[in-house]
Image (spheres, grey):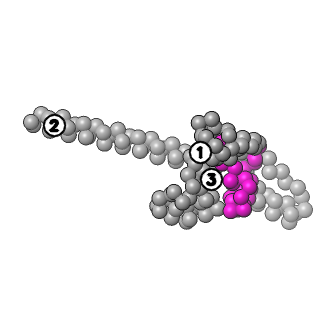
Amino acid sequence: MAILKAEKADDDTRERAIAAAGMAKAADLLAGEYTLIITNVPYLARKSHHKVLTDWADSEQPDAKGDLATLALSRCLALLAHRCSLATVSPQNWLVQPTYRKFRKRAVATHSLKAVALLGPRAFESIGGEVVNVCLAILSGRRTGCREQIRRSRRERAIDSCS
């Protein structure tokens, strides 16, 4: 009996150690900056979010809070290193809906939209019907400092390049 308890304790300790290692790796990945991010973001309407997520989105990402896909897209843009790229398959919502106007403005103020392909509602064979209307978007080149350059150029009546 004592041997079984010891083995169970060892198994529990091992499982906790594996879980802790996984959480540490995830934290390490989320803390870095990336040259290229390619992802099919998760889809989940705001009405299905847990209260913790909706509270966080309301306070930290108010312009992207409408759905999980746009929150994930916003987070991916924040993880990109200077002049690097993001290729994502996501719902088209953020491209066209008025609720995402501020998010679109922020995204293009800090990144260049390189390409958009409207894949449409039947892009995924595994999803029946017209459930998700998706696009492929490629953004790159974090343009930090461009607003300051534009303001300076207006003051000096000179043209600065943000490239």
Residue at point 68%, 53% (across, down): 93
| SS assignment at label 2 | helix
Task: Indicate the secondary structure of the residue bearing disc 1.
Answer: loop
Circle 1 is placed at which residue position? Answer: 41
- Mark 3, residue position: 70
- Observer able to see residue 88: no
Q: Main secondary structure of the magenta part?
A: helix
Mark positioned earlier in the residue sequence (2 or 1): 2
Task: Tell me whether circle 2 and circle 3 mark residues in contact (CB < 8 Å).
Answer: no
Q: Nearer the viewer, mark 2 or mark 3?
A: 3
Residue 89 among those drawn in magenta: yes
Density class for disc 3 (Cα within 10 Å; few <14, some 14-19, many ≥20) is many
Q: CA distance from mark 1 to mark 3?
A: 8 Å
Where residue 72 sits in the image (x, y, percent)?
Answer: 58, 50
* Residue lying at the far front of the rendered structure: 129
Residue hosting label 2: 6
Name the residue at 61% across, 63% down: 62
